[in-house]
């Protein structure tokens, strides 16, 4: 009985058993090399120790010749450009409940083998299970729930589509109706629209790798402002590449806004949920990414007319307001108030002049009197009346003599009079007799 397959919610995942630890590499040298047969046998022994695995993929080649005991298949990964050679009993293919053909998605159970004669690895399978539509839809729903839980459907992550893109990146099938619809409708709406077209497979095992490569190339082009992923309608199997997890995450990671226009209105691959904008059809995508030149011209004409009407109304209102202002007395004869105030201004100016002259005359008289009083009590006036100032000369210092003790005999003196100074020396001193005091009778 085969071991149960390990469940997974991701389309294209592979379930394997843990391989044994790698053996220590044999010793060899340039002088003692190992023959090819030894290496081939060791590789075969190591691969033979690997456990059986469940593998999911898509059949891309099938070689089933009558009379042969072995059927040869090529199983391709659904999301990457990788494939694996598969061998099986032809009876497994003939006894399948669902007819198997190139393009069928299957889950196989088998064991890897290394053929020493050719040096190739092949997966020898003993069980093949076709993946039905119901299981595919269930996996898509599980993947949708997983991406939604991660927040990849959050509207806040959606990037705005530019109003008028410089260049439109278009990923679609070669010479497809979707390409014709997008280009035709976009150029009809905006004749100057420019496209950067990448033709890829839009179904089958090679679709996802080619679409991923096209998204990366267009996202790296600085002239591309928006990318349209377009495909016409089809069956669930045909639209499976647009529900691939790798493709959905690439759409979210792209820096350029991406529009998903896959199938018709009822078709809802997961790319519609992770894209920045979902278009119901490729024609609808063309209408979303470029404006309608005729509609924009009509809108400009309408806005121009509304702007002209608004400007004329504003000018009329302002003209009426100016007329009302000019009709007021202060603006009709603006000098009348000045004339009325002219005489008053002249009278006040004369009064102010008289007040200033009177104040200046009074202050001048006061200043003269103070100057005369100051001169009368000043030292120059005192000297002019016959007084003198006696100073004792001690080197460079000069001190005023106030008593006879300050100038003993021989002291050098300087006597200042009204018109100069006299140098002298003290010959002696004489004390004045004190005044007699009166005695009360």
Image: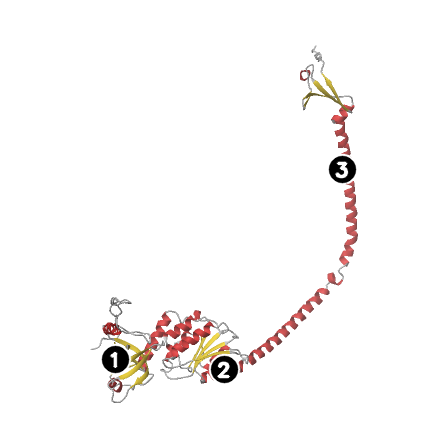
Q: Which of pointers 3 and 2 lies earlier in the amino acid sequence?
A: 2
Residue for badge 1:
125
Depth check, front residue: 209 or 379: 209
* Left or right side of 281 for 237: left
**Image vertical order of residue 122 relative to residue 375, above or below:** below
In screen coordinates, is 109 left or right of 324?
A: left
The residue mark sitting in front, 3 or 1, is 1
Q: Position of residue 254 (x, y in %)?
A: 43, 71
Q: Are marks 3 and 1 in contact (CB under 8 Å)?
A: no
Say which residue label 3 marks.
363
Q: CA distance from mark 2 to mark 1?
A: 47 Å
Q: Can the viewer see residue 135?
A: yes
Name the secondary structure under disc 3.
helix
Give the residue number, with chain letter if any, for mark 2: 183
Residue displayed at 77% across by 58% down: 336
For the N terminus, which image quadrant?
bottom left
Whole-percent x, y for residue 309 in the image = 63, 74
In the image, which disc is placed on residue 53? none
How far separated are the C-alphas under marks 3 and 1?
A: 129 Å
Mark 1 residue element = strand
Q: Residues within 10 Å of mark 3 (few under 14, many from 20)?
A: few
Q: Is residue 178 above or below residue 352?
A: below
Return the residue nearer the eye: 387 or 424.
424
Q: Nearer the viewer, mark 3 or mark 2?
A: 2
């Amino acid at each position: 009985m085969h071991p149960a397959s390990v469940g997974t919610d991701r389309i294209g995942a592979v379930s394997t058993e843990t391989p044994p630890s790698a053996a220590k590499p044999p010793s060899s040298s340039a002088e003692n090399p190992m023959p090819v047969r030894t290496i081939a046998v060791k590789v075969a022994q190591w691969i033979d120790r690997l456990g059986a695995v469940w593998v999911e993929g898509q059949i891309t080649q099938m070689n089933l010749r009558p009379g042969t005991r072995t059927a040869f298949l090529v199983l391709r990964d659904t999301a990457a450009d990788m494939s694996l050679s598969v061998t099986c009993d032809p009876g497994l293919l003939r006894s399948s409940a669902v007819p198997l053909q190139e393009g069928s998605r299957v889950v196989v159970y088998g064991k890897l083998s290394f053929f020493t004669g050719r040096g190739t690895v092949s997966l020898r399978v003993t069980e093949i299970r076709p993946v039905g539509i119901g299981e595919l839809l269930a996996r898509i729903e599980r993947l949708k729930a997983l991406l939604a839980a991660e927040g990849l459907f959050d509207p806040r992550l959606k990037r705005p589509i530019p109003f008028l893109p410089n260049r439109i990146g278009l990923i679609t099938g070669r010479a497809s109706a979707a390409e014709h619809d997008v280009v035709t409708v976009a150029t009809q709406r905006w004749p100057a629209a420019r496209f950067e077209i990448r033709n890829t497979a839009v179904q089958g095992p090679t679709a996802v790798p080619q679409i991923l490569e096209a998204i990366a190339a267009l996202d790296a082009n600085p002239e591309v402002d928006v990318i349209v992923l377009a495909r016409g309608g089809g069956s669930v199997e045909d639209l499976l590449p647009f529900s691939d997890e790798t493709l959905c995450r690439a759409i979210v990671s792209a820096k350029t806004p991406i529009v998903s226009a896959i199938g018709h209105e009822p078709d809802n691959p997961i790319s519609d949920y992770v894209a920045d904008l979902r278009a119901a059809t490729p024609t609808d995508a063309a209408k979303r990414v470029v404006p309608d030149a005729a509609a924009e011209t009509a809108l400009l004409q309408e806005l121009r007319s509304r702007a002209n009407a608004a400007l004329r109304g504003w000018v009329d209102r302002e003209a009426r307001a100016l007329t009302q202002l000019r009709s007021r007395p202060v603006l009709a004869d603006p000098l009348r108030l000045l004339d009325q105030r002219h005489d008053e201004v002249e009278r006040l100016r004369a009064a102010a002049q008289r007040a200033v002259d009177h104040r200046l005359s009074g202050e001048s008289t006061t200043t003269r009197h103070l100057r005369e009083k100051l001169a009368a009590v000043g030292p120059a006036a005192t000297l002019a009346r016959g007084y003198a100032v006696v100073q004792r000369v001690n080197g460079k210092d000069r001190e005023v003599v106030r008593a006879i003790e300050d100038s003993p005999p021989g002291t050098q003196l300087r006597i200042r009079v009204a018109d100069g100074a006299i140098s002298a020396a003290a010959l002696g001193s004489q004390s004045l007799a004190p005044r007699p005091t009166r005695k009360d009778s």
